[in-house]
Image: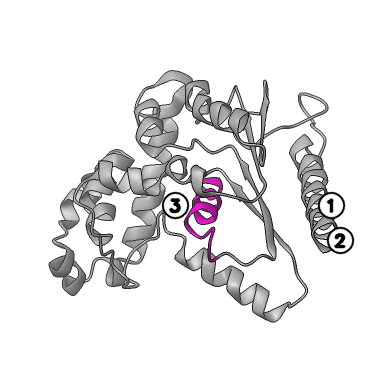
Amino acid sequence: MSHSKCCCFVLSPGHTGDYNDMLKNILENYSNTKIVCIGFSLGGNLVTKFMGENDRSRSPRIIGGISICQGYCAIEGTKWLLNWQNFRRFYLYVMTESMKTIILKHRHVLLSEEVKRRFNLNEREIIAAATLPELDDAYTRKVHNFNSVGELYKWSSCINYLQDINIPMIFINARDDPIVPEPLLEPMRAFAAQHTNTLYLELAHGGHLGFYEGGLVYPNPVTWLDRALVALVGSLALAHADSMLKTSQ
């Protein structure tokens, strides 16, 4: 499938091209740098998908990745966001309105007459979209040349690229995450159990990117996640150094 290369659209969590270009720029300008890629929420999906898509062409100086609080599968995740349990439908509304605000703020580029003709966009349908699937159907799938929202979501979901990752990856989730319910975590549990280069950390509490510690009213400014990430990045760096040492012997 040939996807659009133009610059007149809002990127989705499935588009890893800009992320790849950013990493290449860093590696070119800092020749001794080793990189651990870290993604939060939808960024976790992007980092994971990037690792799977680019495993063969990826620089050996990218030594690992960490994903925090992502849902892994857009198709299944959207089903949960459409119900009101734990105010998920409210979160979906906020995300939808935020995306619409971005699109409308840049309508002179994203919804120019030329763009609307090229991609068969209906501005009224975009403005009227009440959920992300509706917005993705009216706008996102069209500008990225997908035939359906389901096709877009399947292509965007990192769950379909995990098998192609061959460097250490760490995935962190919380069971009380209001946006990523526990059933979405089962595929990652199963995958991590069968792959030695994958570490899956599932905490009972943490919410969505919270992981606060300390008092209920005044939590500690440094969260468990802050401290854990420093330790995990250090562990990945040490594991890589140990692997290089064994290879050279």
Can residue 143 be seen by looking at this rendering? yes
Label 3 neighbourhood size at 10 Å, few (<14), some (14-19), many (20+)?
some
Circle on res. 13: 3
| Spatial CA span between label 1 and label 2 | 17 Å
Q: What's the amino acid at mark 1?
A: Leu
Residue 87, given in percent of the width and then of the height, sits at: 45, 24
Task: Kindly check if marks 2 and 3 are in contact, taking CB atoms under 8 A apart as contact.
Answer: no
Residue 127, given in percent of the width and then of the height, sits at: 24, 50
| Spatial CA span between label 2 and label 3 | 41 Å
- On the rendered image, what quadrant is the C terminus found in? bottom right
Residue located at (16% from left, 69% from top): 118
Taking depth in this image into account, of 207 and 195 the one nearest to the observer is 195
Circle on res. 238: 1
Q: Which element carries disc 1, helix, strand or loop?
A: helix
Q: What's the amino acid at mark 3?
A: Pro
Task: Kindly check if marks 1 and 2 are in contact, taking CB atoms under 8 A apart as contact.
Answer: no
| Spatial CA span between label 3 and label 1 | 30 Å
> Which of the two discs, 3 and 1, sits closer to the camera?
1
Residue 98, given in percent of the width and then of the height, sits at: 41, 49
> Which of the two discs, 1 and 2, sits closer to the camera?
2
Taking depth in this image into account, of 95 and 198 the one nearest to the observer is 198
- Numbered range of the magenta stretch: 43-57
Up-down relation of residue 100 to residue 120 (above or below): above
Up-down relation of residue 234 to residue 206 (above or below): below
- On the rendered image, what quadrant is the N terminus found in? bottom left
Circle on res. 249: 2
Label 2 vs 3, first from the N-terminus: 3
**Does residue 30 appear to the left or right of 88 in the view shown?**
right
Label 3 vs 1, first from the N-terminus: 3
Magenta span dominant secondary structure: helix
